[in-house]
Image (cartoon, rainbow, N blue to C red):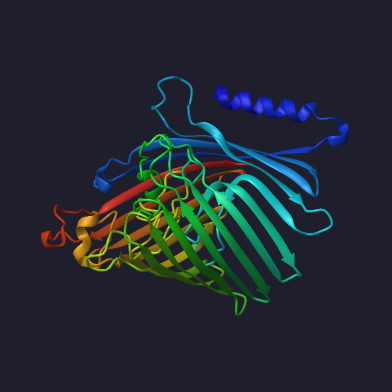
Amino acid sequence: MKKLITLVLAAGLVTAATSPASAVDLKMDGEYLFQFQSGSEGFHGRNTDYAVQRLRLGMTLTASEQLSGYFQLQVGEHDWGSDTTGNNQGVFMRQAYIDWVVPGTEVTIRMGRHAFDLPAYASTSTMIADLVGDGIVASVPLGERYNVTGFWTRLAREANGRGEKSEVNAPKYDLFGLVGTAKFDGFTASPWAIYGTRGDFVNEEGVRYNPDIMTEQGNLSGSGRADMAIFGAGFEWKPFDPVTLALDAAYGRVEYSASPDQEGWYAVGKAAYAMSFGEPTLLGWYSSGDRKGRAMNSGQIPIIYGDFNGTSTYFNAAWGILGGHRSSFGGTWGVSAQLNGVSFLENLSHDFSVTYFAGTNSKHNGAYGDGYDYLTTEDSAVEFNMLSTYEIYKNLTTALELAYIVEDFDTSAAHGRSGSYKDDWRAALQFQYAF
């Protein structure tokens, strides 16, 4: 916390020291998150009892409509009782960038470390690259309906995909891409393309990086350097007022210097109907899997750092700090029936969902991972979710999230599996103070 205070004071002194000719307007924003969670010990073989908190504190420094800067610190995620020194060590710069307009044009430039994602309409993210990285984004409006954005993003070596500090360095990623957006009455289309490179898992001194740093949320587990190309598009159509239809799809390929290539695709579709009592929603997805005898993840679409909202516990749609078990949805398919935004009392709303999901990887590849990490065609589960959200004050919200997973994972020795699986549950109480 001393580091946080020092950095905030330093930023304040810099702002105060500016001359009147270059004065800026300062606007603060932030978010405190607290989460208290418990779950079955069978959930991936670990106890899930946690009390954690996180603070993100940001400052926008605006010089004019054409020039502004943003700076964000993060404290935590801090597990209560784990700090034996009295000083939280998880204090770091999460974002720091400037936005400016090219003189005489409407072209906007963003430079620095910033949150980054690709267009998605059927889900919260494209599941390909939802991350924080360093880079440049240039956005060019073409009339009222069209926009083209180009970017170069380099993932920080000492940060994971969320911009959170990692204890072990990860290989460097460079991503280059284009995004186009076309908006018409009731219809939006956003095609995009990425070319990327990943360094080897060895640094200049010959020390091997820990590959889990960048693969626990993705699936780029091939060896050596990697060159990737991913193409996708998102669509949203509102044929009439209460109905929303959306589709996200992508295809990608990676060539590794020291292991077999990786190639795959996915599609996610959503249909929602807004009604007075809530919004019935149907979500479905399919992501290609590995064929028999192929290397792990070779038949799955390349995922750098995913964030999939298929469920709240098996997948990563948790409302608070602690996400689900997996962010990567490669090698799975599923369908989710949801009823969102149900409200019987003022300031209190509920989201309900029942989701069936299964694997698309060959049943003969079961030895690649247990049922939590690697789903084959012999693995399936049903997850029941309920999220209740209550607005205590305008800026203070609490939420109770409950989940239960009925598991039917393969334990056949013929498929490289052994042991047994039990049904799992999770309960989480969260508080959010946002300003």
Give the residue furthest to the left: 413
Residue drawn at 65 percent across, 61 percent down: 149
Q: Is residue 274 visible?
A: no
Q: Nearer the viewer, residue 359 or 156?
A: 156
Residue drawn at 19 percent across, 54 percent down: 421
Q: Nearer the viewer, residue 135 or 375?
A: 135
The image quadrant of residue 308 is bottom left
Q: Nearer the viewer, residue 7 or 113?
A: 113
The image quadrant of residue 244 is bottom right
Where is residue 160? Give x, y as percent: 46, 43
Where is residue 177? Give x, y as percent: 57, 60
Give the residue furthest to the top: 85
For residue 87, above or below residue 423: above
Left or right, residue 401 beside residue 365: right
Q: Nearer the viewer, residue 350 or 431?
A: 431
Left or right, residue 407 beside residue 130: left
Residue drawn at 48 percent across, 22 percent down: 87
Where is residue 146? Give x, y as percent: 70, 70
